[in-house]
Amino acid sequence: MSTQTILKAIASRRTIYALKPELPTGVALSDVQSIVQAIIKDTPTSFNSQVNRAIILTGDAHKKVWGQVVDGIEGDAGKKRPQSAKDEAYGSIIFFTDDATTEGLQAKFPAWSSAFPDFANHSTGAAQISTWTTLATINVFGHLQHFNGYIKAALGDAVPKTWTVHAQLVFGSKAGEPGEKTYIDNEVKVISSL
Ligand SMILES: Cc1cc2nc3c(=O)[nH]c(=O)nc-3n(C[C@H](O)[C@H](O)[C@H](O)COP(=O)(O)O)c2cc1C
């Protein structure tokens, strides 16, 4: 695998809101599952605690969960994005961290106690963006959402109570192009003496 291939994949991941509720030709749900599984396995975690969890919602479960988000939000403007997730996406990947794991680390390494929730946040973020990037390489596109409390409530007993919801990667086939993206001047300098 070349460096250019990796950098191209990173640049190719974009927020795509215009989705069709299908997978691209030649891609199966099991391909998506394998990618998410590999990323949850290989994303680093503090002290190798393996705090990351994920599930994939599709079919009726996806529609039911997003329907509950729509119903829970007041005002039409706020309903727009979850309604589109429900109607236009094939599925959604829900990212969690397991609070039981974080609390275990806090008990074992009290000097670092206050850092472990941040470390869990960092690690789920890494898993989210790796997943988003890798799915784009098989033409599965999407957008990242944070209806965390609504999603947790809608999932009920389907996931352990100790799992905290961090994000939803809503995915499907691309039905439109991403918006224009502008960049700030943001040079990474090398400092070799101060
Ligand atoms: C940590 C993080 C949180 C984000 N939260 C949301 C969100 O809640 N809703 C949303 O529509 N987009 C969300 N986005 C998408 C960003 O707005 C988007 O990545 C950014 O504008 C750059 O565009 P690009 O993804 O096309 O490169 C989030 C992105 C990141 C990295």
Image: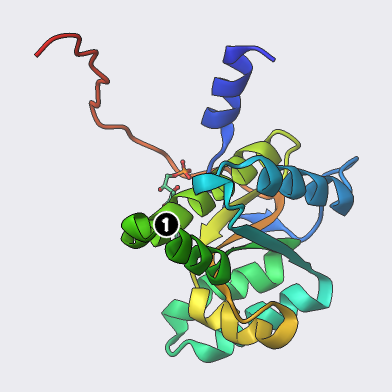
Dividing the image into 4 quarters, which one contains the N terminus? Answer: top right
Q: Is residue 142 left or right of residue 125?
A: right
Does ligand 1 reach within 8 Å of label 1's beta carbon?
no
What colouring method underlies this structural image? rainbow
Pointer 1: residues within 10 angstroms few (<14), some, or many (20+)? few
Residue 21, position as x, y percentages in the image: 76, 61
Residue 163, position as x, y percentages in the image = 59, 72
Label 1 element class: loop
Residue at image mark 1: 109
Q: Looking at the image, which residue sits at the far top?
A: 192
Given the current orientation, which residue lies at the most extreme left position?
Answer: 194
Which residue is rendered at x = 61% and y = 38% of the image?
Answer: 133
183 relative to 96, above or below? above
Q: Quadrant of residue 64?
A: bottom right
Residue positioned 34% across, 35% down in the render:
182
Q: Above or below — where is 151 with respect to 110? A: below
Q: Amino acid at mark 1?
A: Phe
Q: Residue at x 72, y 49 (%)?
A: 36
6 and 137: which is toward the camera:
6
Choose between 136 and 31: the one closer to the eye: 31
Q: Is residue 193 above or below residue 81?
A: above
